Image (cartoon, rainbow, N blue to C red):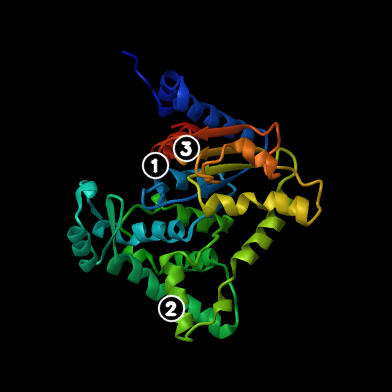
Amino acid sequence: MSKFTSIRDFMESQYLHFNAATVVDAAKGYETHLTEGGKMMITLAGAMSTAELGISLAEMIRQGKVDIISCTGANLEEDLMNLVAHDHYRRVPNYRDLTPQDEWDLLEQGLNRVTDTCIPEEEAFRRLQKHIHALWKDADEKGERYFPHEFMYKMILSGVLEQYYQIDPKNSWMIAAAERNLPIIVPGWEDSTMGNIFASYCIKSELKPTTMKSGIEYMMWLANWYTQNCAGKGIGFFQIGGGIAGDFPICVVPMLYQDMEMHDVPFWSYFCQISDSTTSYGSYSGAVPNEKITWGKLDINTPKFVIESDATIVAPLIFAWLLNQ
C-alpha cells in the first residue's frame, strides 16, 4: 500500500482522470500563474465562510497567494459570525428529513439554517450588530463614507471582537485579510444580514444610505485596481461557485475595453471555476469558459478549467496543494 507524505503527493498519485485530474491541472495552473509573476482574484459564492473555508483560505492570504477577493455579503459577515459564535452553532446532520414544523422550531430557537448548519442569531448577528452599528453611526455623524468591508476591517482591527473569539483567529480569513489590508469587492452587499440591518437603520432615518459606498463605486474602484495590476503575467480569476461574487468582477475587463475604450487592457490570464451549475438553463454560473470569450472576458489562450464538483471539498484541496501541505 502506498504511503503518502502530503496531500499534494496523494492528489498527484490518485487524481488522474475526469474531475479529479482537472483539480490537479487547475492547481498546477494556479501555481504556474503565481510563479510567473501573476496576481490572483478569488471569488466566494454560497456559504463558503460557514463551511469554514477560512481554515485554508486564511493561510493562502498570509502566504500572499491571493491578491484580491470578491465575495457575497454573506461570506464577508459569516466568517466573523463563526469567529465570535462558533460554540453556539448547531449541526443538523439529518437536515434532509426536517419537517416544516422542525424548521419552525429552529426559527423560534433563533437558529437560522444553512444546509446542515444553524447560525445562532443572538450570539452571531447581534454581537456583530452592536459594534458595527457604532462604526456606522460615527461615520454617518462625521459625514464619512466607507465600503462594507472597510467597516468590517475597522471593527476587526479595533480589537473589540477579541472578547468573543471562539475559534483560533488564524482560521479566520477576514482577520488575515484585515491584517494585510487585502482588497475586497462585495457586490450586492445589501443582500446580507448586515446589509438588511443597515437598510433598517436607514428606513428609521438613523443612518443615511450614502454613508455606505455602493456597488457602482466598487466597480469604479475595481476598474482602477485592475488597470494598475494587470501588467506582465496579468490577473487570474479563481471562482468558487457562481452568482454575483464571480459575475460582477469578471465584467470589469469588457467594461474597460468596450465602454472605456481602453483597448490595451489584457483579458483575465487564468480562469478556474468550481461549480455544479449546468449550462442547459441559460445559467451564466454554469457557462463553460469559452462562452466568456464571446463577452470579452477571456482570451483564446487563457488557461481555463471547470471543476464540476462540490466547492467545499475541492477548494481546500487546491489550497492545500498550493500551500505544499
Mark 2 / mark 1, whichever is N-terminal: 2
Tell me which amino acid carries mark 1: Thr
Tell me which amino acid carries mark 2: Ser
Specify few, some or many for label 2: CA neighbours under 10 Å numbering under 14, 14-19, or 20 or more: few
Q: Dot 1 lies on which element?
A: helix
Q: Nearer the viewer, mark 2 or mark 3?
A: 2
Tell me which amino acid carries mark 3: Phe
Q: Nearer the viewer, mark 1 or mark 3?
A: 1
Are discs 2 and 1 less than 8 Å apart at CB? Answer: no
Mark 1 / mark 3, whichever is N-terminal: 1
Specify few, some or many for label 1: CA neighbours under 10 Å numbering under 14, 14-19, or 20 or more: some
Q: Disc 3 designates what residue?
A: 319
Are discs 1 and 3 less than 8 Å apart at CB? Answer: no
Q: Dot 2 lies on which element?
A: helix
Q: Residue at x 47, y 37 (%)?
A: 319
Q: Disc 1 designates what residue?
A: 312
Q: Quadrant of the N terminus?
A: top left
Q: Dot 3 lies on which element?
A: helix
Q: Quadrant of residue 77?
A: bottom left
Q: Position of residue 278 (x, y in %)?
A: 48, 39
Q: Say if 191 sits above or below 19 in the image.
A: below
Q: Quadrant of residue 121?
A: bottom left
Q: Disc 2 designates what residue?
A: 200
Q: Position of residue 78 (x, y in %)?
A: 39, 58
The residue closer to the viewer here, 267 or 225, is 267
Q: Say if 211 sits above or below 170 in the image.
A: below
Q: Residue at x 81, y 51 (%)?
A: 262
Q: Quadrant of the C terminus?
A: top left
Q: Nearer the viewer, mark 2 or mark 1?
A: 2
Relative to 252, 196 lies left or right: left
Q: Position of residue 153 (x, y in %)?
A: 50, 64
